[in-house]
Image: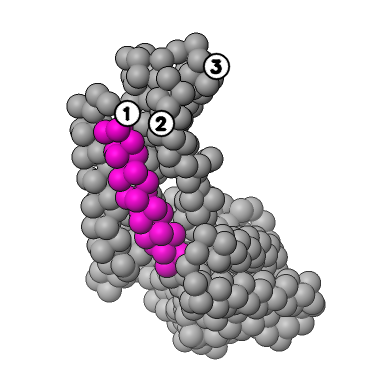
Amino acid sequence: MKLNTKKILSCLTVILLIISTIPVTVSASEDRVRDTDDKRPEITKNKSLNESEKEKQEEKLEESEEKIERKQERVEEKKKQLENARNNYAKAKSNFHAINKKVSGNKLNPNSKKVINATKNYLNSTLAYMIKHLENKKTNINSSDANFTNKSLEDLNEYINELKQKRTELKSAETRERISETSDETREIWRDAQTNSNSIAIKTVNERINEHLEKSKSISLRIEKEIKQLESEGKNVSDVEELLNGYKEKISNIKEYQNDAGKIYSKTTNKKSIKEAKLKLQKAIRELKEGNNILKEIFKQIKDYRNDSIKLDDKEDINASGNGTAVLSGSLDINISTTDAKMVIKDFSGDAKVNITGNYSKVNRNENKPEGLEDNRALVYHGLSGNINVSGSSLNVMVNGENIELNADGVGSIVFSEGDFDIDNSSKKLEADLDEDIENTTSNNTSVSTTMRDE
């Protein structure tokens, strides 16, 4: 009886060794200005192209959002399955220890069916938990879109299939010797799977960090360009400069942690070195997230500086939409679309051209004054509803109303004095690019980081 008890306890010890490796948390003159209701083919064409491009962008955005949602759904489903497996494992473990206690106290025969079944149930729930853990790992790898996913997935599939085979074999195991053999084989499979899984996690995090570091170079340069532009406009942007320096410091820290992790992992891949490498990469991810938070604040401040006035330098056009008042000045080509607005146009050089497609009422506010006076170079429109194109080398255009969409190209400025406009300029685009970068980088790294903690 004592000999049998020692054998069964030996078998139970092997199973406990396996369990110990499982994760705990797995913008005029009337005689000079041409004013017509005829449709302008070029404007119509450009508008059509703009609408088409806008539709394409919206479709692309919808597809991207749907893709993210599908990925998130798969991730959440795998998390639920993993949690269920964890709960089942915990119950089987509790029951197993209760049975083991009775065996140790000679209250149960180690060869009894009750002990054999409890041992099999415990090992089976352990195998189920291992399988779900590796399947969850596969989902995280797919979500990361890493460049080496195919080989990694093949390896994980192989380990999963081997563990499933062990579950099948366990069903027919009737003796403690056969259960012990299955335990030993499971332990070897899990050890290899863990080593491979750690390598995958480290590679995935390194790839994501490298992508972020590469993007950070262009992001920093673009912010520096924005700072110089704002300074040339006489604005004090020392607060933005300070934030940028803080962001650069975070990037430096990320590189340091990444390099430290690489040195540790390249020397040896034992459990201790893997843990140290993971801790370094987790610190790098934490710095990455904090850096992205700094970037969000930078773009918020740049947006605040830019909202009242925008400079046009003939290098890129400006798009804005909303309700209120916008004043555009300079050598400009302006396209405006509105449903109900008032517009005043002043042509200082006498070369302005105005083309309107839509409904409006034109009012010459200097009608009693002799023709040719400089003040007569102002055109006033009320009840504007349609599409307007205004171009000239020295313009001042004020538009006020609702549902205004405008595009301006050339050299000059735009001042938004009333209302609420959504401005699409370099800062806005930069902010949008950042949001996408943050979504793709931190979300993937978060899932990878979670995976690393589960190892």
Residue 182 placement, left or right of 224: left
Q: Residue at x 55, y 78 (%)?
A: 263
Closer to us: 370 or 122 = 122
Q: Residue 77: percent from the left, percent from the top?
A: 37, 35
Badge 1 vs badge 2, beta-carbon distance below 8 Å: yes
Q: Quadrant of the N terminus?
A: top left
Q: Main secondary structure of the magenta part?
A: helix
Classed neighbour count for the residue bearing mark 3: other residues with Cα under 10 Å, few (<14), some (14–19), many (≥20): few
Q: Residue at x 55, y 16 (%)?
A: 105
Q: Amino acid at mark 3?
A: Gly
Query: Residue flagged by tag 2: what amino acid is it?
Result: Lys
Name the residue rendered at 23%, 57% in the picture: 154
Q: Is residue 280 above or below residue 17?
A: below
* Disc 2 + disc 3, Cβ < 8 Å: no
**182 within the magenta span:** yes
Q: Determine which quarter of the picture holds residue 231.
A: bottom right
Instruction: Tell which tag, 1 or 2, sits nearer the viewer.
Output: 2
Which of marks 2 and 1 precedes in the sequence? 2
The residue pinned by badge 3 equals 105
Q: Pinpoint residue 372: horizontal percent, then vertical percent.
A: 56, 83
Question: Dot 3: what SS?
Answer: loop
Q: Which residue is mark 1?
A: 176
The reply to whether residue 121 is in sight is no
Query: Which element type, helix, strand or loop, lies under badge 2?
Result: helix
The residue carrying mark 2 is: 7
Where does the magenta region start and end?
Answer: 176-203
Residue, far top: 107
Image coordinates of residue 203 in percent, x first then y, are 42, 67
Residue 87: x %, y % from top left: 46, 26
Residue 322 appears in the picture as rendered: yes
Above or below: residue 112 compared with residue 13: above
Residue 359: say if magenta: no
